């Protein structure tokens, strides 16, 4: 009997201990998830600066520039400051976040600029602190004190971890580019270079006339590679597996209206044609495509995991009023360094025309996918760092751990901050 009682008691004790542990884990996970949701709602509004107002001229959109950290000098157009103390492992440690956002009344008008701070106190209590800044642009009704109390608010106790990892742009440009997220880095200047000779400079690069293949066949084609102005080699990018990217450019229908040629008169050919023969493009015979290329500029598409990556076919402009936007979205099945190029081959008289390229851009789509380098958990860009800065951060990965009687559960949440770093119209307050 004594043996049976001991065994039964031990089983009961183990079952009770397991039930208590499970209950503590559930409570920890529930609180971590609840606080993460509150954090996400608050932090995602970082940099919010626009609102609609009614005026005598109708409904207009107004902006406030005070949500930037240092807008007057344009040294730091981000809306936050993240403090990351040194830590020994990713399983512990506390960051602190300070950010700015505009606050609105029930009619959607700005009523204050809010300074919000999240940090963990020495007793492991997560604190939200808030202050308001008077701004001449923000004249909305009602008092924001309900959402921005002057006294610090205790949001959670027994916090074991509070970490924020800023996102990195996914398309990392080579050392010759000044931007890691967007090409070109500013303005609309770019170049399209032909390895056989010729550099065509933007903001409008004119390609053509082209070599024409014979009607019986041929392999004459031209390759043009995206480059920075004055650059002799193509601009290479590092594309990451699983990210979503876009290539876009404009193809306006351009003719030389000062050319003396008239309809029914002398034959006009080439770049000086008043009637751009690129409109004679034949889809079954001629070829225009854009895609990823080897950095050796040998004309071959990039190869990933043994397979050539397909190009995007596109039409040239057909008339002055036709849509001139060419936009292609893609992802790669493995990390790769590649250039971006255009290939042209003509078998019809369209070869005598010219292709005019404007606003050539390569960028990562930040509205769906965010890139976090978990091998660099201490990553924290500054406004004067190169090539990254705080204004390029479009999301944070929050890791929040809560301790309930020895059981720690962590919630990992991605918080998009699309308005961080957006430059307002000039003249804003």
Image: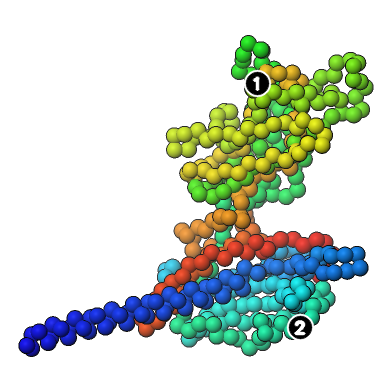
Instruction: Look at the picture and state if 220 lies above or below 254.
Output: above
Counting the numbered discs, the total is 2
Please give left or right for residue 390 compared with residue 155 in the image: right
In the displayed orientation, state which residue is furthest to the top. Answer: 216
State the image quarter where residue 292 is shown: top right
Q: Secondary structure at mark 1?
A: loop
How far from the left and from the top, in percent, is residue 421? 69, 62
Does residue 385 appear in this view? no
Look at the image and tell me in which quarter the N terminus lies.
bottom left
Please give left or right for residue 31 compared with residue 47 in the image: left
How far from the left and from the top, in percent, is residue 51? 77, 68
Please report the residue visible at 66 percent of the width from the left and 12 percent of the height from the top. 215
Q: CA distance from mark 1 to mark 2?
A: 67 Å
Please report the residue visible at 91 percent of the width from the left and 68 percent of the height from the top. 56
How far from the left and from the top, in percent, is residue 214? 66, 12
Q: Which mark is residue 316?
A: none
How far from the left and from the top, in percent, is residue 347? 68, 18
Residue labelled with disc 1: 285
Mark 1–mark 2 contact, CB under 8 Å? Answer: no
Q: Secondary structure at mark 2?
A: loop
State the image quarter where residue 108 is shown: bottom right
Please report the residue visible at 90 percent of the width from the left and 24 percent of the height from the top. 259
Q: Earlier in the sequence, mark 1 or mark 2?
A: 2
Residue labelled with disc 2: 142
Does residue 1 appear in this view? yes
State the image quarter where residue 227 is shown: top right
Please report the residue visible at 75 percent of the width from the left and 23 percent of the height from the top. 280
Look at the image and tell me in which quarter the C terminus lies.
bottom right
Circle 1 crowding by C-alpha within 10 Å: few under 14, some 14–19, many from 20:
few
Circle 2 crowding by C-alpha within 10 Å: few under 14, some 14–19, many from 20:
few
Please give left or right for residue 284 compared with residue 275 in the image: left
Instruction: Look at the picture and state if 320 lies above or below 143.
Output: above
């Amino acid at each position: 009997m004594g043996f049976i009682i001991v065994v039964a008691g031990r089983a009961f004790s183990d079952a009770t201990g397991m039930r208590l542990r499970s209950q503590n884990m559930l409570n920890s996970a529930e609180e971590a998830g609840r606080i993460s949701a509150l954090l996400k709602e608050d932090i995602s509004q970082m940099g919010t600066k626009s609102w609609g107002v009614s005026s005598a001229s109708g409904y207009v959109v107004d902006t406030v520039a005070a949500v930037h950290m240092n807008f007057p000098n344009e040294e730091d157009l981000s809306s936050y400051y993240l403090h990351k103390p040194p830590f020994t492992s990713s399983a512990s440690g506390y960051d602190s976040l300070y950010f700015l956002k505009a606050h609105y009344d029930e009619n959607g008008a700005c009523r204050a600029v809010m300074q919000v701070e999240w940090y963990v106190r020495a007793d492991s209590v997560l604190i939200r602190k808030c202050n308001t800044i008077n701004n001449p642009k923000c004249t909305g009704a009602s008092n924001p004190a309900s959402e921005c109390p002057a006294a610090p608010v205790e949001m959670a106790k027994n916090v074991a971890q509070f970490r924020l990892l800023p996102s990195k742009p996914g398309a990392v440009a080579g050392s010759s580019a000044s931007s890691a997220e967007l090409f070109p880095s500013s303005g609309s200047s770019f170049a399209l270079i032909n390895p056989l000779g010729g550099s065509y400079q933007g903001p409008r690069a004119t390609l053509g006339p082209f070599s024409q293949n014979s009607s019986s066949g041929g392999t004459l084609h031209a390759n043009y590679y995206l480059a920075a102005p004055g650059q002799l080699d193509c601009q290479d990018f590092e594309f990451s597996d699983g990210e979503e990217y876009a290539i876009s450019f404009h193809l306006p229908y351009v003719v030389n209206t000062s050319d003396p040629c008239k309809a029914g008169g002398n034959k006009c050919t080439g770049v000086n044609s008043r009637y751009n023969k690129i409109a004679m493009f034949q889809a079954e015979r001629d070829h225009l495509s854009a895609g990823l290329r080897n950095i050796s500029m040998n004309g071959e598409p990039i190869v990933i995991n043994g397979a050539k990556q397909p190009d995007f076919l596109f039409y040239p402009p057909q008339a002055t009023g036709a849509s001139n936007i060419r936009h292609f979205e893609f992802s790669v099945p493995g990390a790769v360094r590649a250039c971006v190029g255009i290939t042209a081959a003509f078998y019809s008289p369209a070869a005598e025309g010219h292709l005019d390229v404007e606003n050539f851009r390569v960028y990562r789509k930040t509205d769906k996918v965010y890139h976090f380098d978990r091998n660099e958990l201490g990553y924290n860009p500054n406004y004067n760092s190169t090539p990254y800065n705080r204004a390029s951060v479009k999301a944070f990965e929050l890791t929040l751990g809560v301790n309930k009687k020895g059981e720690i559960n962590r919630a990992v949440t991605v918080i998009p901050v699309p308005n961080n770093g957006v430059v307002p119209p000039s003249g804003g307050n």
